[in-house]
Image (cartoon, rainbow, N blue to C red):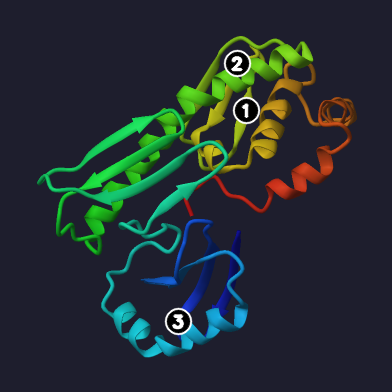
């Protein structure tokens, strides 16, 4: 669960509820503060904690390098937890980065004393996470697309995984389906919606009434509500 509000001094305050969190963790970013809180933490407690450390947070924020605001800061507290996969970072003992990955889980092992505030290091880590998501997607998404294709008797030619941040998926006139690796951040029911959307294009290549009628049948009458819910997400690792 994620809650976002704007603070006049600190910027965008993003509150993530994490099932395994035991305490409130705060991390400053150039454009705000990210807070990870245990489940059922009262809003009053969250705001009191923010006020208690406001001066320190503002001071630390002023010393951060200017990292693009559309990039989530990556350090040992960074994680992606979705229905599809889990991506985390851990501190290791070796002087080089390495990654342990299998379908559904990946861990980036970082050298001791890694400078996460270095802009170049942040850019590199974003590329690493993107490659991890793409590999996870290659392992998992085509299999699910084939399952949905079989269930609904909608055949396609080939499935390819890309790193598109402008669209979740596409279908060509040759019935080739492209899926963004960022589908990995979606809940299962929304990634299924995207795949069913592209499978519907194997029959209807436009977004006319016949297309939406077909997609509505494929989603048990929920096409519009799923479409609206998907708008709350962006193809990114924010």
At which x and y percent is residue 107? Answer: 33, 41
* Residue closer to the observer: 25 or 180: 25
Q: Which mark is residue 228?
A: none
Helix, strand or loop at label 2? It is loop
Q: Label 2 vs label 1: CA separation?
A: 8 Å
Residue annotated with mark 3:
10
Which is more N-terminal, label 1 or label 3?
3
Q: Is residue 183 left or right of residue 51?
A: right
Q: Earlier in the sequence, mark 3 or mark 2?
A: 3
Residue 135 quadrant: top left
Q: Position of residue 34 (x, y in %)?
A: 45, 68
For the residue labelled by badge 3, is the local secondary structure a helix, a strand or a loop?
loop
Q: Secondary structure at mark 1?
A: strand
Q: Residues within 10 Å of mark 3 (few under 14, many from 20)?
A: many
Depicted 86 relative to depicted 147: above or below: below
How many marks the image carries: the answer is 3
Residue positioned 71% across, 21% down in the render:
199
Q: Residue at x 56, y 78 (%)?
A: 6
238 is higher (above) or lower (below) than 95: below
Q: Nearer the viewer, residue 165 or 147?
A: 147
| Residue 31 percent coordinates (x, y) | 43, 72
Q: Which mark is residue 170?
A: 1
* Alpha carbon distance from label 3 to label 1: 39 Å
Image quadrant holding the N terminus, namely: bottom right
- Residue 8 falls left or right of residue 196: left
Left or right: 2 with respect to 132? right
């Amino acid at each position: 669960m994620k809650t976002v509000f704007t603070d006049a001094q600190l910027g965008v305050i993003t509150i993530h509820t994490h099932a395994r969190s035991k305490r409130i963790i705060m991390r400053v970013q150039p454009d705000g503060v990210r807070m990870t809180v245990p489940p059922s933490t009262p809003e009053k407690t969250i705001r009191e904690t923010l006020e208690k450390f406001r001066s320190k947070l503002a001071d630390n924020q002023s010393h951060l390098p200017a990292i693009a605001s559309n990039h989530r800061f990556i350090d040992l507290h960074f994680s992606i937890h979705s229905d599809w996969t889990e991506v985390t970072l851990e501190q290791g003992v070796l002087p080089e980065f390495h990654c342990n990955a299998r379908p559904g889980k990946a861990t980036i092992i970082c050298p001791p004393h890694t400078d996460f505030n270095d802009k170049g290091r942040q850019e590199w880590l974003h590329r690493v996470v993107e490659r991890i998501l793409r590999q996870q997607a290659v392992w998992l998404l085509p299999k699910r697309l084939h399952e949905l294709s079989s269930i609904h008797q909608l055949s396609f030619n080939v499935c390819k995984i890309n790193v598109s941040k402008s669209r979740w998926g596409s279908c060509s006139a040759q019935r080739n389906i492209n899926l963004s690796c960022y589908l990995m951040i979606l809940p299962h029911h929304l990634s299924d919606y995207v795949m069913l959307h592209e499978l519907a294009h194997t029959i209807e290549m436009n977004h006319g009434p016949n297309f939406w009628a077909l997609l509505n049948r494929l989603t048990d009458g929920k096409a519009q509500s799923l479409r609206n819910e998907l708008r709350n997400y962006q193809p990114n690792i924010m």
